Image: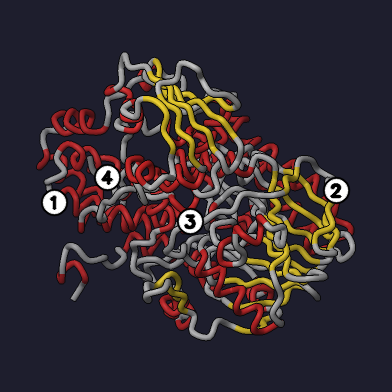
Amino acid sequence: MTDSAVSPDLPKDSTTHTRAVLDSVKFDFDNSDFERANRGLVATHPTGRIELPGGRMVWDVNRYDFIRAQSEPPDTVNPSLWRHAQLDAIHGLFEVAEGVWQARGYDISNITFIAGTEGWVIVDPLTTEPTARACLELANAQLGSRPVTAVIYTHSHADHFGGVLGVTTQADVDAGRCIVIAPEGFLLETVAENVIGGPAMGRRGMYQFGPSLPPGPKGHVDSGLGNAMPVAQPGLIAPTHDITYTGQEMVVDGIRIIFQNTPETEAPAEMNFFFPDHGWLCMAENCAHTMHNLVPIRGAQVRNALAWSKYIDEAIELFGDDTKVMFTSHHWPRWGTDDVKHFLSLQRDLYRWMHDQTMRYANHGMTAPEIAEILTLPPEFQAESHTRGYYGHLVHNVKAVYQRYLSWYDGNPAHLRPHPPVDAGKRYVEFMGGAEALLAKARTSFDAGDYRWVTEVVNHLVFADPTNVEARHLQADALEQLGYQTESSTYRNAYLTGAQELRNGLPPSRPSNRGGLIQALTIELIFDSLAIRLKAEEVSGEHTVINFRFTDIGEDWILGLQNSVLRSVRGRLDPVGEVTLTLTRLTLLSVLGGDATFVEAIQNGEITIDGDGSALLKIFGHLDTFMTGFAIVEP
């Protein structure tokens, strides 16, 4: 009996068309990656399960035993992606070099432990506090307990700083017992991505990483950069030391480090660094054992492929001849100068090729979808697993390059102002002769294996009438087959998550919470995050000025409402302000985080108020609430 005979809401088998596609996937990779990924194993986590207090699961390697137990790929997973997932499923604490260890497989990212004179220098403390703490405990148990004397954030993505509270505390940082090093602009870019765009990006990230998909051959198998994302809120401690230029050198707990700033690469604020006394090179996330994203499908700023390629080339020139081992923020290291330089050269040329060839065709007048359809990876990139698209996707990267130079608009005025999806959907369905006629034609296309066309056409009917069960299930079936076929883990997760939601409905919706990150924000960034929540339509014509005096950080601020926007000014109080609040930064954070109200904080003596308190309502009474779980594959 097939799955479809059991329930239309369950995942289906692969079709003959999908099996033919998967049978045609060819690659000839040696086993060197498996040797590298297993090299230096010291120990594994005793249970593989990491929990929050109370028992809620954050990470569980056991859910992916099906990958370790089955050597041959199932007929619902691209064979090349299956091999990559097997590599990502390898977990443990590994020795990289004498004095350097990595914990891999307990988060989507790696945490690196370097033995300093007094304690641990930690590179990238993972995504969440529980996973970082578990890895630190594993390292201390196996290698001897050491205090954490320094934390290095390689870049401004949450999976490289979000677990910092699992390895140190704000009190230790404030007291100077632990320093935090990051590239220039780190905090600003962290806010832009994770707070200002955080609610939308978090929901879209559900499609990119697929956390709602059950692990299994018909569900979640990998996330490209690692097995999966841990399930817990990230935290943040602000950097104490900024890296502002390439060549900047620091001695960190007795270890000499030379930094290379690489802005606008994999992250807007990112850096590589080299340990000249040991021959260790950290390439952050600028290199990985996969083609990376030039813009992720969760959304982000478009990355600079040309600069990315040049920064890798600069790293080769600066450090290549002296490098003995290279490690990164994801995946496994490379050992030996020649192997490292060969790896870096291919990574460098991959991003340059995507950039140059996209713009070559763009300057012939071709549009992004047209270029993406004709470009295929040259044999030299196809031959290496680390330049294949397990995380990034060539189709998406071509469009990112095009967008960076020429925007989303392709120059055709017919595309300047198309109807939004619901209005367009209704018109398309009517033009096609109604819902039944559209579905009949779409079923014929599905039977012919033209799943891309089915998803494009039936999407119009789903948006015109989301209650049409036949349309939802046909759209889901087509998305599912595309997910089974693709080599890209992020595309697979997006396709299968879309299919799941079409069949079973949206996930629960609740107010979006970025509290763990907000704790580290400056006042300017706090006010910027408030400004995007202002319901401008409710405050038209309003004008007010509120003064803030922050006693713990010695700063005065003005928060003003005028012309339906919020603006903030640092360094003075406005004499015509309607009200002045004297408080601490932490008190403001507590109020904004929902732990207290302004009234409660005033009554408790945490806020002193001078002036008309009702002026607060003119701003704080008109702030929007962002919800998780908004619709994506339906209106």
Q: Which residue is pictured at 53% across the width and 67% down the height?
A: 107
Between marks 4 and 3, how big is the CA–CA gap?
A: 23 Å
Between marks 2 and 1, how big is the CA–CA gap?
A: 58 Å
Give the image location of residue 75, x and y in percent: 38, 70
Q: Which residue is pictured at 66% across the width and 57% down the height?
A: 173
Between marks 4 and 1, how big is the CA–CA gap?
A: 19 Å
Pointer 1 local density, CA inside 10 Å: few below 14, some 14–19, many at least 20? some
Residue labelled with disc 4:
631
Q: Quadrant of residue 161?
A: bottom right
Name the residue type under label 1: Glu
| Mark drawn on residue 399 | none
Give the image location of residue 252, x and y in percent: 80, 59
Q: Say which of marks 3 and 2 sits in front.
A: 2
Mark earlier in primary sequence (4, 2): 2
Residue labelled with disc 1:
470
Name the residue type under label 2: Glu
Name the residue type under label 4: Ala
Q: Give the SS element for disc 2.
A: helix
Mark earlier in primary sequence (4, 1): 1
What color scheme is it? Answer: secondary structure
Q: Give the SS element for disc 3.
A: loop
| Mark drawn on residue 317 | 2
Residue labelled with disc 3:
488
Pointer 2 local density, CA inside 10 Å: few below 14, some 14–19, many at least 20? few
Left or right of 292: which side holds 315?
A: right
